[in-house]
Amino acid sequence: MNRNPHVAIVGATGAVGQEMIRTLEKRNFPVGRLTLLASARSAGRKLKFRGQEFPVQELNRESFNGVDIALFSAGGDISREFAPLAARAGCVVVDNSSAFRMDDAVPLVIPEINAADVSWHRGIIANPNCTTAITLMALYPLHRAFGVKRIFASSYQAVSGAGARAMEELKRQIGEIVSGRPVTREAFPHQIAFNVLPQVDRFLPNGYTREEMKMENEGRKIMHHPTFRASVTCVRVPVYRSHSVAVSAEFERPVSLEAAREVLQKAPGLDVVDEPENQKYPMPLFTSERDNCQVGRLRKDCALDNGLCFWVSGDQLLKGAALNAVQIAEELLR
Ligand SMILES: NC(=O)c1ccc[n+]([C@@H]2O[C@H](COP(=O)([O-])OP(=O)(O)OC[C@H]3O[C@@H](n4cnc5c(N)ncnc54)[C@H](OP(=O)(O)O)[C@@H]3O)[C@@H](O)[C@H]2O)c1
């Protein structure tokens, strides 16, 4: 791999794409050349990187000539069409969509957990689902120490998880409600302002949504734990940024609060914020725009044997998307 790679961002104008540009800059990634790609709608728009303006180009089949690393975040359909083409043109794709995550020929990577899987890629590496990534940042270290059997979890997912248009929708609806106008709706099936929606993604025949089943499916692949089980309810909340997840986890071995706290304090990419007596616990307002996820509300689960409850919160545009993708790109340069 070129030490100063030519990096392309597909979906550069989107909620994740813009964070990718900022993350490359913030982490001093040794970008040799930068190409920003999006749809025809954005062609010609200029975005800033290291104080310089870069024009957005329309994505086409020739976009990847000479590109070393392509960070994709333009949805599953674009990834399915263009990622194999980019890989054939000789670049390594880090894909944010769900298109290739469960493909046996594609590594699915959270660098703090399974960085070594990067080594067997064949041109495409998948970035995990955002809710799964944030949960595993706390669950995996506990799994290593105590052996997780299963979890029961509920998520509280920010609107930016559904893209730039969804963020606009929350802002617009708040304005409409406050000024007494009728509420308009485009991005979500129901009003999201002053409401919570117990649906993220499409429903499956088993009654769970696709988003909910990602925790078990992707969790098994990332943790190399084929019997891991997860029963999850994913909920969209009127928060701009940062997902939070309430988790009850059952382990093979007995787990004490002290031992769990010690494990979590040493975990990379995670801060323990757990002082209930001082009303200190992780909240999306304070994990937004931060690289590290936060875990708190630690307690022994009163309804499970060898059980632990915790609450984890993290910026899903960063650890759940852009930051994780750039960390994978960093692994490629090691
Ligand atoms: N948001 C999150 O927290 C999050 C987390 C993890 C993974 N992801 C995944 O990341 C992807 C992007 O999500 P997002 O939230 O950033 O969405 P978004 O804000 O809606 O942005 C979508 C991006 O895709 C581009 N695009 C759309 N159609 C295109 C086309 N035909 N050709 C080229 N580019 C096209 C858009 O360009 P225009 O501006 O030109 O339309 C825009 O740059 C999705 O696969 C999503 O599942 C998102």
Image (cartoon, rainbow, N blue to C red):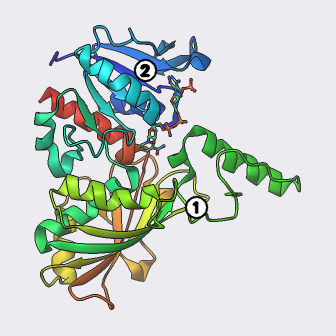
For this view, does 218 lie left or right of residue 73? left
Q: Residue placed farthest to the front in the image?
A: 205
Where residue 45 sits: x, y (%)?
58, 15
- Nearer mark to the viewer, of 1 and 2: 1
Residue 270 shows in this picture: no
For this view, does 190 lie left or right of residue 24? right
State the quadrant of the N terminus. Answer: top left
- Which residue is label 2 attached to? 49
Label 1 CA crowd tier, 10 Å (few <14, some 14–19, many 20+): many
Q: Secondary structure at mark 1?
A: loop
User: Which quadrant would residue 94 be assigned to in this image?
Assistant: top left
Residue at 20 percent of width and 41 percent of height: 107
Q: Is mark 1 within 8 Å of ligand 1?
A: no
Where residue 55 sits: x, y (%)?
50, 12
Residue at 45 percent of width and 13 percent of height: 60
Where residue 134 sits: x, y (%)?
34, 56
Q: CA distance from mark 1 to mark 2?
A: 32 Å
Residue 105 shows in this picture: yes
Q: Specify the label residue 275 is tagged with.
A: none
User: Which quadrant would residue 84 be assigned to in this image?
Assistant: top left
Residue at 61 percent of width and 19 percent of height: 41
| In the rendered image, the vertical position of residue 37 relative to residue 148, given as above or below | above
Name the kind of residue labelled 2 in the image: Phe
Label 2 CA crowd tier, 10 Å (few <14, some 14–19, many 20+): some
Name the kind of residue labelled 1 in the image: Val
Front-lying residue, 128 or 171: 128
Q: Residue placed farthest to the right in the image?
A: 180
- Which residue is label 1 attached to? 237
Who comes first in sequence, dot 1 or dot 2? 2
